[in-house]
Image (cartoon, helix red, strand yellow):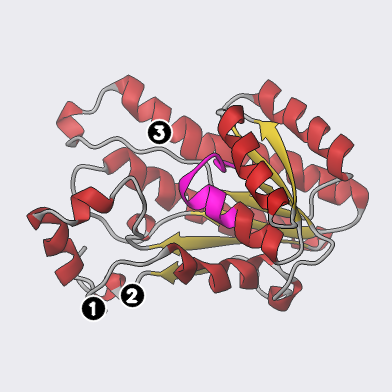
Amino acid sequence: MRVDGKRALVTGASGGLGAHFATILAQSGAHVAVAARRVADCEKIASSIVAKGGRATPVRLDVADQASVSEALKDIVSAMGGVDILINNAGIANTAPWLSTSEEAYDAVLDTNLKGAFLVAKAVAASMRDAGTGGSIVNIASILGLGVTGQVGPYAVSKAALIQMTKSMALEWARFSIRVNALCPGYVETDINRDFFATEAGTAIIRRIPQRRLGQMNDLDAPLLLLASDAGSYITGTTLAVDGGHLLAPL
């Protein structure tokens, strides 16, 4: 499941899962465009990858802005020649009940998580089609696009819609040898949520996971590489949950 010689774009790669995905793809042989709004953080991630012998290019990208997407893709084509793999990872969430969710908060989540994924996927797919190379697009969704819990309504809506968009894109773009799949992580431990999962409320969630543990970032490595690499060449339009069995129990 290596991606030697491939050119990968990872959005939302300035930290967290995005930075991890960029690092794993680089370790597996890809030249990676590390893209996000916080370009200084992207530069740090790219420098870390290069220091370990990988290839990485930092890119400023606001996924919800069409002009930024177009400019970033031009920069990536100039630096790397094109894109073979897109990891649509950029995403945000708000925590509030529906009755306390403002229009601005709703729009911010949907603009980044759904419209942003659409804008980037469309631009990259067009470049793949025009180059005649095909490629793989992996949309990072969530088990909250397949199940539901309280206080994160707009996020859950965005991820459910992203899963359906994945299927629609896969159907239309298969003729161009472009595969589109959705990776749906469960609760994965990161620097941002580690303190919460140490609380009583957090440990209660962990007890509801059949494997009785949080996912670790490296639990996503093999699923990501399967969908991104030629090992998954006959997989398109699928939704792959990586959640320790969480969808089998109440969320």
Q: Does the magenta stretch include residue 80?
A: no
The residue type indicated by label 3 comes to: Val
Residue 8 position, x and y percent, is 73, 52
Q: Is tag 2's residue or tag 1's residue first in the polypeptide sequence?
A: 1
- Is residue 157 at all visible to an observer of this figure? yes
The residue type indicated by label 2 comes to: Gly
Image-quadrant location for residue 217 = bottom left
Image-quadrant location for residue 250 = bottom left
Question: Where residue 210 is drawn, which disc sits there?
Answer: 1
User: Relative to 237, is 162 on the left or the right?
Assistant: left
Residue at image coords 54%, 49%: 18
- Name the residue carrying label 3: 109
Cβ atoms at labels 2 and 1 below 8 Å apart: yes
Identify the element where label 2 is drawn: loop
Label 2 neighbour load within 10 Å: few <14, some 14-19, many 20+: some
Q: Is residue 20 magenta?
A: yes
- Name the residue carrying label 2: 244
Label 1 neighbour load within 10 Å: few <14, some 14-19, many 20+: some
CA–CA distance in space, label 1 to label 3 = 29 Å
Q: Give the range drawn in magenta.
A: 10-21
Using the image, determine if residue 69 lies above or below residue 166: above
Identify the element where label 1 is drawn: loop
